Image (cartoon, rainbow, N blue to C red):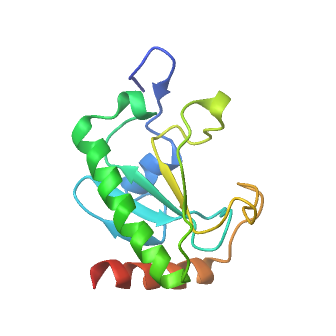
Amino acid sequence: MTVLNQQTTYDDNNIFAKMLDGDIPYHKVYEDDKTLAFMDIMPQAEGHVLVIPKQKAVDLADLEPEYAAAVLMTSKKVMQAQRQVFEREGVIQMQLNGSQAGQTVFHYHVHLIPSSIHELGRHAVTQADNNDLAAIAQKLAAVIDA
């Protein structure tokens, strides 16, 4: 474990760290040298994507500026793909810092949810079908790579 700020300690065994290490499978939407975007397996709406930095950071306070910029640029690409694939303008962008704010995985991440606030389901309630996630990830990745 690495202490990053006074409130939180980075756990090298968190699920996102394990994904970055190749220990846990995921449905990739986009990847570059500083970020990874993948399907949320407990989505609040169809097409819910998470964007994470390839840096050990619990929350925004820990994130180096170049990784913060990379997360925003990747988020922009994913949002453009979500708008095209799901034919909708509305994409909820959400980022939670600390357990009191609702953060459950303590590796910095951004939620990109093609939905409206009125349609939004609860997080971490229902696991999505693995085949559905794979199909959506392929559609979004194809738009980003185009």
Quadrant of the drawing holding the N terminus: top left
Residue 14 image position (x, y, % from top left): 51, 42
Q: Is residue 97 left or right of residue 42?
A: left
Q: Residue at x 57, y 66 (%)?
A: 48
Q: Is residue 69 left or right of residue 106?
A: left
* 46 relative to 12, above or below: below
Residue 95 image position (x, y, % from top left): 52, 44
Q: Which residue is drawn at 71% across and 55% down?
A: 124
* 85 relative to 106, above or below: below
Residue 106 image position (x, y, % from top left): 52, 37
Residue sticking out furthest to the front: 89
Quadrant of the drawing holding the C terminus: bottom left
Looking at the image, which is closer to me, 79 or 103? 79
Q: Which residue is drawn at 33% across and 77% down?
A: 144
Residue 98 image position (x, y, % from top left): 57, 30
Looking at the image, which is closer to me, 81 or 58? 81
* 68 relative to 61, above or below: below
* 1 relative to 15, above or below: above
Looking at the image, which is closer to me, 116 or 136? 116
Q: Which residue is drawn at 66% across and 64% down?
A: 116
Residue sticking out furthest to the top: 6
